[in-house]
Image: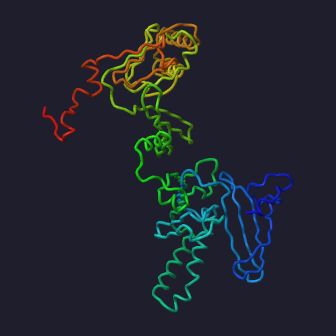
Amino acid sequence: MSAIGQLEPVRGGPLFRPLSAEDEEQQPDEIESLCMSCYRNGVTRLLLTKIPFFKEIIVSSFSCSSCAWSNTEIQSVGRIQEQGVRYTLAVTVRQDMNREVVKTDCATARIPELDFEIPAFSQKGALTTIEGIIDRAVAGLEQDQPVRRATDKDVAGKIDEFIGKLKQLKEVDSSFTFIIDDPSGNSFVENPCAPQKDDALVVTRYRRTAQQDAMLGLEAEETDENPADSMEDLRNEVLQFNTNCPECNAPANTNMKLVQIPHFKEVIIMATNCEACGHRTNEVKSGGAIEPLGTRITLRVTDPSDMTRDVLKSETCSVEIPELEFELGMGALGGKFTTVEGLLKDIRDLIVKNPFTLGDSSTPRRVEKLQEFGRKVYQIMEGHMEAHFILDDPAGNSYLQNVYAPEEDPELKVEHYERTFAQNEDLGLNDMRTEGYESGLTSER
């Protein structure tokens, strides 16, 4: 490693240059070093390079002219990552065998169809291809075959048969799955479609186990975890799961995060972003139970700064603006975590740009009224018109930011009330029976 610090950037350029066959200035540095086979001097070649859409690595290659021993390996320049990584590639065409692979020495390579696995630390880290990894595995299996044939022909025959299956994989006559699992998070499989998504490649990041931390030489986590610490980890983690775009039905990812709203409660924010059509959605779910009392929040909008207040509107919340004689019923717009301005924009778009109210059957009077409604909403947003903004949530799971918290906000009024029978019916509470559940008995109706 001391020799690496002596390396100079090429012609004043960066020390780590992107890996490219067209870069003629990117040449390895040669360092005389000891051969660990014959203990004579050989040559180590170091190439400091950067893998596109990945990170910097050091490729080292040693060769000895005296005994012809050679060795090639890679080292990641970065530290061990916060999470492990698993690359799952569906190999379906011959070109997939040429994908570049960075495999560290602590990574495991698997091919489930053959029940084949290259364990961690059984091979040195390498910058190669999928075909190269299979070739290295074949070479390792063939190395001791002459001895096996002399001592145990049955075992040698089975290994020869398995080697044939590995070689056949390179022709890709049938599809198979190639998996790289690296707890250090420093392995990589090329995405030829980058920066676009590769449908054949799935990248999964995960939390390491205590055994994996110990394998990497990291301090093992305490076995008796504090529940408060686990909940804190959950708050800091963004969960991701596969779904379909509601607009074009293409595969997409939905991100989900648990968020603590100050002076309120925890909520779950879910956001979907479709790379195929660009459609984006966000939705908010309450992280807690239905409150014993309903909540009615009234904000008197008097200044444009009120537009920046955070708003959590649950699915059970209705919105009312008396000055506009407007009321948005429960369930409309769904759950949202936004600002007062953002919610007013959504209301304006829902009413003014609704194709069912602006179609061929619409009358000029209706169009004029809708346009007038849109102008008044815009005036409220610009601070040219005072109005009352009312959130009424029977479930008690909505929130409007108090900018003076924990002091009282003179423009904000929060009321709690007993729900009516009809509101309980809408929430499904009238038919809910919880008596005796703690003791394992349910009350009979």
Image height of 23 relative to 252, above or below: below
In the image: residue 113, left or right of residue 47 = left
Where residue 294 sits, quadrant-wise, is top left
| Horizontal and vertical percent position of residue 325 | 43, 9
Where residue 382 sits, quadrant-wise, is top right
In the image: residue 313, left or right of residue 102 = left
| Horizontal and vertical percent position of residue 236 | 50, 40
Q: 286 or 89: which is nearer to us? A: 286
Report the residue at 45% width, 43% height from top: 229
Q: 239 or 441: which is nearer to us? A: 441
Q: 156 or 37: which is nearer to us? A: 37
Image height of 403 relative to 50, above or below: above
Image quadrant where one finds the C terminus: top left
Report the residue at 21% width, 38% height from top: 437
| Horizontal and vertical percent position of residue 223 | 42, 53
Colour mapping: rainbow
Image height of 407 relative to 4, above or below: above
